[in-house]
């Protein structure tokens, strides 16, 4: 498992727990897991308020969706302000990475990217899903989302109403002109180039050097010039 997958594991775990509770003990939870493991879930699409995908079962392919609440503008502002105070988070965002700290509401300004179970709802083109109950297809999508979150946490950002790029721009606006302080390093003391470049872009502009360009001194020489080498004949 890569470092990124390990750092984002809590986000995927929190989603899986909330999603499991949202299924309310339905047998579709286990059946959906089998479908997901067998590759039944096609490309996952994210838009504000929902995550969707086509899911192939034995008899037909259905479009399943999981619906999530959007975060308010005030909540996004709180999240961005908290991330702006985290030098590593700023470096990750400017380098087009979603910071791992976003998985922890304690480090995300109290904002939970993973919605509570009672705010997760399901729908599907199958008869069960049309009644807005969890079905095998929407359960399979939920498991596929958990797997995807280990590498692509922006899935939940988009469903909550903001893309990772928009969040990065919001954070950049907050830290513009602020000195981020010492560069973050890995446990072995290494500062990655992406972190160096991205954080350097946010350091405040330095004042120009104080040079007195109006006055000039005349250079004088006391020794006569020395003759150059004689030309060859």
Image: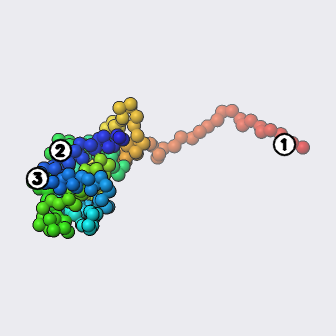
Q: Secondary structure at mark 1?
A: loop
Tag 2 near tag 1, CB within 8 Å: no
The earlier-in-sequence mark between 1 and 3 is 3
- Structural distance between the alpha carbons of marks 2 and 3: 24 Å
Could you say which is closer to the camera, residue 124 or residue 191? Answer: 124
Residue occupying image coordinates x 24% and y 62%? 52
* Residue 35 location, quadrant: bottom left
Tell me, what colour scheme is on the image?
A: rainbow
Q: Which mark is residue 105?
A: 2
Disc 2 to disc 1, how far (Cα)? 82 Å
Q: Quadrant of residue 197?
A: top left
Mark 2 or mark 1: which comes first in sequence?
2
User: How far across and how far down the image is residue 125, in percent?
Assistant: 20, 69
Residue at the front extreme, as displayed: 58
- In this view, the residue in front, 127 or 230, is 127
Q: Earlier in the sequence, mark 2 or mark 3?
A: 3
Percent position (x, y) of residue 86? 26, 42
Relative to 139, is 168 on the left or the right?
Answer: right
Pointer 1 local density, CA inside 10 Å: few below 14, some 14–19, many at least 20:
few
Query: What is the secondary structure assignment of the residue under circle 3?
Result: loop
- Where is mark 3, residue-wise? 24
- Identify residue for label 1: 231
Measure how far apart labels 1 and 3 are at the Cα level. Answer: 101 Å
- Residue at 64% x, 35% y: name it: 221
Q: Is residue 186 above or below residue 214?
A: above
């Amino acid at each position: 498992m890569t470092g990124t997958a390990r750092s984002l594991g809590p986000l995927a775990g929190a989603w899986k727990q909330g999603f499991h509770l949202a299924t309310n003990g339905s047998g579709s939870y286990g059946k959906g897991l089998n479908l997901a493991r067998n590759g039944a879930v096609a490309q996952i699409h994210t838009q504000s308020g929902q995550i969707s995908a086509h899911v192939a079962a034995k008899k037909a392919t259905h479009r399943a969706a999981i619906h999530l609440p959007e975060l308010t503008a005030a909540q996004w502002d709180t999240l961005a302000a908290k991330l702006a105070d985290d030098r590593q988070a700023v470096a990750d965002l400017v380098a087009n990475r979603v910071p791992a700290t976003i998985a922890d509401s304690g480090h995300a300004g109290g904002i939970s990217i993973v919605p509570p179970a009672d705010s997760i709802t399901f729908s599907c083109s199958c008869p069960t899903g049309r009644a807005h109950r969890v079905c095998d297809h929407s359960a399979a999508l939920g498991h596929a989302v958990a797997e995807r979150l280990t590498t692509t946490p922006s899935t939940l950002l988009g469903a909550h109403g903001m893309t990772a790029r928009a969040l990065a721009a919001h954070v950049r606006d907050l830290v513009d002109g602020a000195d981020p302080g010492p560069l973050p390093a890995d446990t072995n003391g290494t500062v990655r180039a992406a972190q160096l470049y991205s954080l350097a872009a946010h350091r405040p502009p330095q004042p120009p050097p104080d040079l007195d360009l109006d006055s000039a001194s005349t250079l004088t020489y006391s020794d006569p010039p020395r003759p150059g080498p004689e030309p060859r004949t």
